[in-house]
Amino acid sequence: MSETSPQFQERSIVIVGVGLIGGSIAAAVRKRFPECQVIGVGRNEERLEQARRSGLLTSWTVDLNKSTVPAGSLGIVCLPVHQIPNAVTALLDANCETVTDAGSVKESVYEALGPNPDERFVGSHPIAGSEQSGFEHADANLFRNRLCVVTTSSPEDSALSRVQRVIAFWKSLGSSVYLMSPDEHDRVLALTSHLPHILASVAASCVNPELLTFTGTGYRDTTRIAAGSAKLWASILMGNSKHCVEAIEQAEEQLRKLRESLTSGNIEALEQLWEAAASNRRSLNGNHSAPS
């Protein structure tokens, strides 16, 4: 379900976690809407000050409370999945008017917030990133022409002002927006994002260091995303363990078919399997626009 929304109206945003994603959000806002305050929140004062000096932040704090959060602020949590619920709660306690996040797992976040999550929280997931980390790699155009999923419990929620506010925010950064339930998001992303990272890690681990001299572009392209943060990806996979296991089982079935084709010498079956995968890859929508 693709959504439209009004123009950017934020006067202040509070970003908890000024790394690659948080830094890129800050960069995008500072570039497009320089009148908006961008407040960074973290634990490392030196790093936060470096981010401010680089132009990403207008100010920063290590003490998140009502006095450090301007009235009417939009809060955005850009932390590993297992850290998101506590940060969301802290932003809500600090009277953030609306809070969202950028995590790639949604259902476990809502569950951790309790049986009746505060309605001011609207989960989201910009499907953009890099194997790099840290605000030094921030990109003001990271979300441009990318898809962002905003999660709602029911289709009726799409009309609520807080949901529309989050939709408007991501659209202002150049993203297209699609509404999904938290569980549907996790099921889909297990296949489209989490499984590729799992398989890249598997492929990377199958080659011993002494054989890396013999690798070419195929190995490098396939395993590029395996170079990401182990802590970050362990948090993501554990947060979506149910659907990741289901995705791994689908991959195991495809590997079984490939193995059987090879062991039986059935080249026709092997070609069919390969062509089906190749055809799917060729049809990939390169502009990451929202599904119709």
Image (cartoon, rainbow, N blue to C red):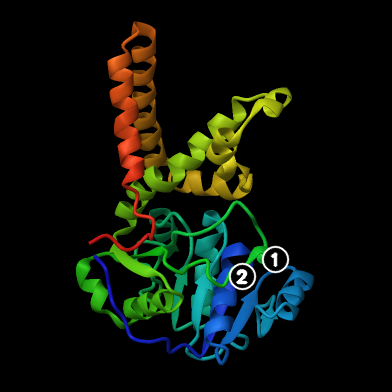
Q: Outermost residue, top direction?
A: 264
Nearest the eye: 223 or 9: 223
Reply above or below: 256 against 110.
above
Task: Tell me which amino acid carries mark 1.
Answer: Glu
Question: What is the number of callouts on the image?
Answer: 2
Image quadrant containing the N terminus: bottom left
Residue indicated by mark 2: 23
- Residue 292 pos. (x, y %): 22, 62
The residue tagged with tag 1: helix, strand or loop?
helix
Nearest the eye: 110 or 135: 135
Q: In the shown orientation, is residue 281 left or right of residue 30?
A: left
Q: Residue at x 63, y 44 (%)?
A: 227
Reply above or below: 45 against 31.
above
Nearest the eye: 190 or 212: 212
Q: Which mark is residue 136?
A: 1
**Labels 1 and 2: the sequence-earlier one:** 2
Is there a contact, CB below 8 Å, between mark 1 and mark 2?
yes
**Residue 65 visible, this angle:** no
- Residue 247 sits in which quadrant? top left
Q: In the shown orientation, is residue 29 left or right of residue 150?
A: right
